[in-house]
Image (cartoon, coloured by chain):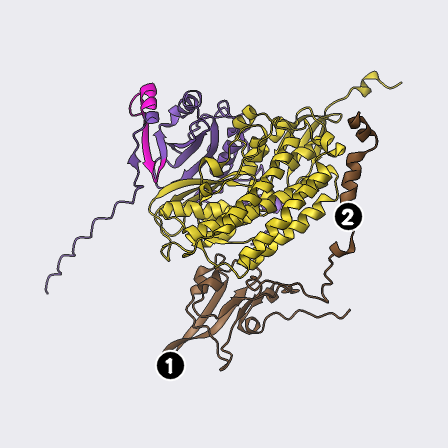
Amino acid sequence: MVRLLKKIFLVDLFQGLWVTFRNQNPKYIYTEQYPAERPKIAERFRGAPRMNTNPETGEALCMGCNLCSLACPESLIVMTSTRNEVTKRKELVTFTFDTSRCMFCGLCEDACPTDALELTQDFEMASYTREGQIWDRKMLEEGPKPTRYRC
Amino acid sequence: MPDATFLDSTELVLNMGPQHPSTHGVLRVILKLDGEKILGTDCVIGYLHRGVEKIAEARTYAQFNPYVDRLDYVAAVSNGLGYCLAVEKLLNVEASPRAQAVRVILTELNRIASHLVWLGTHALDIGALTPVFYCFREREEILKIFEQYCGARLTTHAFRIGGLQYELYEGFEREVKAFCDMFLPKVDEYEELLTSNRIWVSRLRNVGVLNAEDCKQYGVTGPVLRAAGVRWDLRKAQPYSGYEKYDFLIPTGQNGDTYDRYTVRMEEMRQAVRIIRQAVEGIPEGPIMAKVPKVIKPPVGEAYVSIEAPKGELGYYIVSDGSTQPYRVRVRPPSFVNLQALDRMVRGALIADVVAVIGTLDIVLGEVDR
Amino acid sequence: MADEKPAPPKPAPKPPAVMAATPWESDLARELNDRFGVGVCQAYSYLGQNFFVVGPDMVVSVIEYLKMGPGFDYLVDITAVDWPKRAERFDLIYILYSFSRNERVRIKTQIIEGYRPPSMVRVHLTANWLEREVFDMFGIEFGGHPDMRRILMPDEWQGHPLRKDYPILQQDQRWVEENLDGASGQ
């Protein structure tokens, strides 16, 4: 008898509706006003790559060891280096990183012995051309510059 | 006067094409219909075939690790675990206890995340529009934990061969415990929305029945097999990565219909929380990486290792010829084998039941096609 | 002119490394020996995983017997490996599991190119799509299969991708031009 009453008066459907109405409370509503406010990103986020320079002297930390290009599954890092006769060390000449084929796995960052190559928290790296996706050393040191829109 | 035969019904061939909101990816199902009743189906797959097994032959073992996440992209951590366990078996090393505990925690969180996607999309296909928002709200919390641990939300690349790459971050245990406490009442909330709802029950009861004998014949594993009544789970039958230390139940169903698969997966989410709570209580101290050489060159041989992924038995068969690159990597995908049973489950049912059955099999086309 | 010293003899080429499998003594191996005769199924074990090497014509009977007798009722996987330098080019592997014994076993055969192994569909229904995939990727046709066509690649594709002589960047250019409107992006 109880079951018949429950069936006629749609008790189970109202139970579900009550759950939905309970969640209409404004304290549960969360909207992020992007691009005015940026989302909170974790420190270890694997985003856009960047080449670090020594903060005091400004010279590149990269020593041209080629470990990152050996570690990359897609083989998209290409670098050339020359040997500096004065200090008897290798010096970086060019460094190319193809972000269009990168899968942001982080193997290059793990392989780098100095902290030269790093995946930052930048995720806005769109470009209008395919060539714009191939980053050279200058672009890597400065980072992507997304257009800022004013609302 | 039209000929009387024009009213004879003939078979209609309908194409549920690769672009379809309910086929969970690019799956094409060709249906042979008599009115609305289904006489037969033919699945056409391969729209997402990326040649992952061929790529594996051109990469080293460590370089292939990120590709493996892209197979079952909804639950990427399990794929990584299976691959790392297979290569570790070939190298005959075992990960350290700390690495094993963290692996279990992340894999179970990943199981909850996968089941949340399943629940949200399955309910959406049936017509219930609210559960998908609630499920993805909870999934957001899990993805935040993944992002803080390894740096990516979906294609995590969380494990390395021999252990872990990253140490646990500050507050990992606290956040995981907070998630567990927050999550259990939410499962009850989903059940309140769906379990006794008459529309849900009538859409799901006795739809897509696959009994235990058929499941074994078709090689179907995972929650589909458990809903048919077979109490079998690879985490209990052939434990890996320290699962024998944790105490959990294996939910089973009775009839093997879609409603039973729903209850089995809901209960699996609760059991996953139970495992996480036990694992997070005592994560042992110690190194996170076992003694694995820098250049991984397993001896000539082969190994097959399989784990209980959220979708079924995920297996890796790796053949090594002694060099740094694997000679052959075969991924045994659970969704591929489960999808074969679609034809059996859907004979004589209606078109709307095809949508329900595809949803309940929980297929991910990345795994089916590789 | 001083005679050239005879060149030192070249060191003998190292034999190719072989898997260090050990013979596997067990009840299952003895049962199979009793049923089929000694030498038909050779049992080995590597890293704790056991496998039998069987001749290609005996595979169906062995798998059928394993299903009926010891209860290996679940066919986990069918796959193949291509060894182009060997006379028997392909290694065909069946992985079986028994629920009652909680044991996994592999059956390996070695077949030459062009051989059509019998299909396993009437013993295990899972074999349907698994064999279609082996055909698609390697070109091994299975005799008696109800529906032998390509499964992952398009139906008119020429070539079998997972063979070792199919380079990783190769495409069926004709199919790409016909179906994808022009040259590919590679």
Instruction: Name the image quarter holding the C terminus of chain B.
Output: top right
Q: Amino acid at mark 1?
A: Thr
Residue stretch rendered in magenta on the structure: C30-49
Residue type marked 2: Arg
Q: Position of residue B222 (x, y in %)?
A: 55, 35
Is residue B25 visible in the rendered image? The answer is no
Which quadrant is home to the N terminus of chain B?
top right
- Which chain is the one coloured yellow? B
Q: Are marks 2 and 1 on the same chain?
A: yes
Residue A140, compared with residue B238, is above or below; it is below
Of C170 and B24, which appears nearest the observer?
B24
Q: Quadrant of residue B329?
A: top left
Q: From the image, tell me which residue sits under label 2.
A: A22
Pointer 2 or 1: first along the chain:
2
In the rendered image of the structure, the colour used to display chain A is brown
Q: Magenta segment: does it hold C31?
A: yes
Q: Residue at x 81, y 33 (%)?
A: A10
Is the residue marked by circle 2 packed among few (<14), some (14-19), or many (20+) residues within 10 Å?
few
Colour of chain C in the image:
purple
Using the rendered image of the protein, determine whether residue B252 is visible from the camera's viewpoint: yes
Which residue is the site of mark 1?
Answer: A87
